[in-house]
Amino acid sequence: MRNHDVRTHRSDENLARPDQLAWAMAEVATDPVEVETEVQEMIINRVIDNASVAVASLNRAPIVSARSQALSHPVATGGSGASIVGIAEKSSPEWAAWANGVAVRELDYHDTFLAAEYSHPGDNIPPILAVGEHAGGSGHDLVRAVATGYELQVDLVRAISLHAHKIDHVAHLGPSAAAGIGTLLGLDTETVFQAIGQALHTTTATRQSRKGEISTWKAHAPAFAGKMAVESVDRAMRGQTSPVPIYEGEDGVIAWLLDGPDARYTVPLPAPGEAKRAILDTYTKEHSAEYQAQAWIDLARRLHTEHPEAGDPEKVDSILIRTSHHTHFVIGSGANDPQKYEPTASRETLDHSIPYIVAVALQDGTWHHERSYAPERAGRRDTVALWHKVTTQEDAEWTRRYHSLDLQEKAFGGDVRITLTDGTVIEDSIAVADAHPLGARPFARAQYIEKFRSLADGLVDDAEIDRFLETAANLPDLAAGELGQLNVRAAAGIVDLATGPKGLF
């Protein structure tokens, strides 16, 4: 890897193109280096993973709305259009990216990478795939493009914190998706550079979408970034330029949205000819909840069996979770969001509430993407009583491990201390989720396939399930024009397009 040093520059310094971060990212995107077999296999896993959670979301309100919007826009000229998950109808690529991006993100159930910033790198796939299908790309093209999207988003996430300044994490996604599309289309470095700048400029937004009463926009935010990436590439291909330098300018992103004019960042990027391997450092979810909740669900499931009394509010005095800064302040009691303890809170709020998640997993010994969030489940009297006994606390060591650059010690868990009313104390800890590469049951191809089969059951015909999985397994060999085969069709009667809400279009 080569380290790219980034700081603010005055306009009269005339920072040269090759010294700008967006240019360095564009060079990564246009590097013809091939994708390693191990990376190809993981890309297949994540295509399957995205399809799993998208299919499971087909009839949820945000997806119905986004799909209806997309279908209001006909296939654009210049290509064959792009598929919308679950149905035969197509739309133009930017609107397919929108609809599919919402479907992938809605359940908070696909892959993650956490470092200086947070991210769901699988959000790169919908816009890249939509453009690839529209433009008649091949499986080989898609693999190279997805490797770029993952690489650049992960590299930005390693180095530049957005949340510290209350900027939403999709500001790293817009540029990475634009770069991935540039790789797919074989664009030159200057065009990709301009697309990256436009994508960043149009996708910076505040983190209020993940604070307090969390709304349905949480699922739309990455889809919007993907849509903007598609449109940014289109404009750049037509010769339109972006604010320059977008990161380093004296009125740019670093100076006014991030750490300020005196800030310096070091972004690690692959050197010319170096393989893009960042996807191998990412990890998916076994459970439909915010990533920091994954390990706690696994620990609570274990405690449900070993200490069933821990799920009885009549026997529990308090439950204290000692964990990282992020877990405490974003999804724990340190957020000071009363909504995280409110039985009538939105699903989006509950999946960002460690107190709620731990209480339900302790009582049920399992986790389900729908049943665990049902209003009747959240409102159960004994659950509410237990839930309100759970608090979190930052622990310096768990915070250090959360931010560690050593992937062997990087951790997303913590310690739990359950004090019973009779004075008994139950203590346990967990570092990473069971499905994490270093966890008790790491996800491999078999687990991705099982996740897809489980979530598609009853929604997709068995023959279609088998067809999709076979197609995905042969992704690198798909010929030009065959990327539409990666769309999963729902069974007859599952999707009723007539129920879409009415809007402006």
Image (cartoon, rainbow, N blue to C red):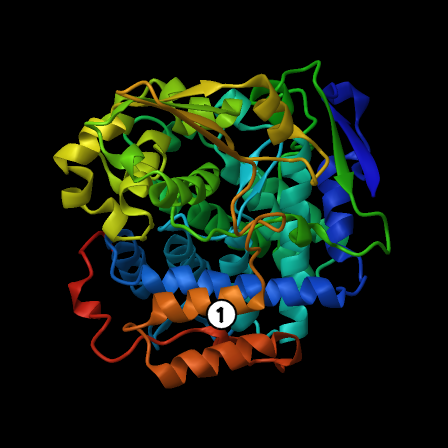
Is residue 241 in view? Answer: no
- The residue labelled by disc 1 is 449
Residue with the most extreme top position: 262
Residue 131, picture quadrant: bottom right
Number of numbered discs present? Answer: 1
Residue at horizontal 79%, vertical 26%? Answer: 14
Residue 123: x and y in percent read 51, 52
Instruction: Estimate how packed mark 1 is, as few (under 14), some (14 to 19) or many (20 or more) residues with alpha carbons within 10 Å.
Output: some
Residue at horizontal 53%, vertical 52%? Answer: 435
Quarter the N terminus occupies: top right
- In front of the other: 156 or 322: 322
Q: Is residue 443 left or right of residue 100?
A: right
Vertical side of 298 occupied by 110: above or below? below
Residue 290, picture quadrant: top left
Residue 360, picture quadrant: top left
- In front of the other: 378 or 339: 378
Residue at horizontal 60%, vertical 44%? Answer: 175
